[in-house]
Image (cartoon, grey):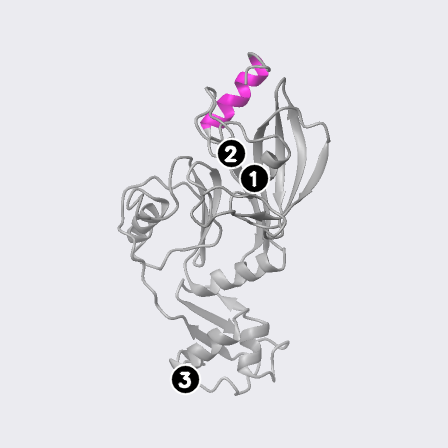
Amino acid sequence: MFEQLGHDRLDFRIEEAQSGMKIIDVMVQWMDLSVRQVRSGKNRKDVLLNGRPVSVNGFVRTGDLITYQMEVEENYFEPEAIPIEVVYENDDLVLINKQPFVVVHPTKSYPSGTIGNGLAMHFKKKGINPKIRFINRLDRDTSGLLLIAKNPYAQHVVTEQMKRDEVEKRYLALVHGRVEAEEGTIDAPIGRPDEDQVERMVMADGQPSTTHFWVRERFGNATLVEVRLETGRTHQIRVHFNHLGHPLLGDTLYHEGSDLIDRQALHAFKLCFRLPRTGEHHCFEAPLPEDFERLLTQLRTEDPFRI
């Protein structure tokens, strides 16, 4: 079992279930490391058995301690005092509730003032400087849960869960018009007609894309839907609902702006996955931001047809 000691190392205590196995097999099958990571650690002499460098082809006994010292990669984002709302954090991960209008990481257009800069400051205050590894991404104007790994091991473990469709991502979206079906699945490939074009669209030769939805509330000319992504294409929710004829409220890229909200009404409210090391399954939720809550209140209490 794992002994949690830091963001840059793994310590695994051998129990009867692993006794007699090769070290490399324990590291891959029980510690969730990739063969590439094990080989890399071996070459750096960062695989230890009871504190001493060892061949990964050696065998273990009950009570032995395998240590894997991860390759240190430091963060290169400039620390800035950007507010970060932490939902959950441990030695491997930090999960935050991203506010709208904030870019995830620095780019040519947004060299500072990003979530990456805020996380660099957050880690600096903790006395660590790990490379910031975003596991999921959110558009600048989308709010909600954003997961970041502090080391390559955690990134690998959760990314593999995503490949096996074991990570559940749910969103709330407010779309134009009344969606009549109580629930449904949008199975339509998404592509980009031109590499220089930001917009995506449903295309026959696009990437396979699947979106599941459930109606949560109907208003005069709008519908609140809960969405689960089976795939994770860029702008997938925005493209799929626009394809259905129900573009997101406030989405100026795929439809038009709104005087009720000055961004697309989209919030990543739920994320479920298994924690690295322990394998414990957790579901996390993030409350709606103020602008989204205010919009729903207006539709419920003032004029449900005001869209």
Estimate the x, y position of residue 111 in percent, counting from the top left. Answer: 28, 46
Furthest toward the front, the residue is: 194
Which disc number belongs to residue 53?
Answer: 3
Q: Is the residue under label 1 in contact with that under label 2 (CB below 8 Å)? A: yes
Which disc number belongs to residue 254?
Answer: 2
Between the C-alphas of marks 3 and 1, the distance is 52 Å
Residue on which the image places disc 1:
239
Between the C-alphas of marks 2 and 3, the distance is 56 Å
Which quarter of the figure has residue 180? top right
Rendered position, 301 above or below 94: above
Between the C-alphas of marks 2 and 1, the distance is 7 Å
Q: Is the residue under label 3 in contact with that under label 2 (CB below 8 Å)? A: no
Q: Could you tell me which quadrant the C terminus lies in? A: top right
Magenta span: chief secondary structure = helix
Rendered position, 61 above or below 216: below
Asked whether 92 or 142 is in front, the reply is 142
Please provide the residue range marked out in magenta: 290-301
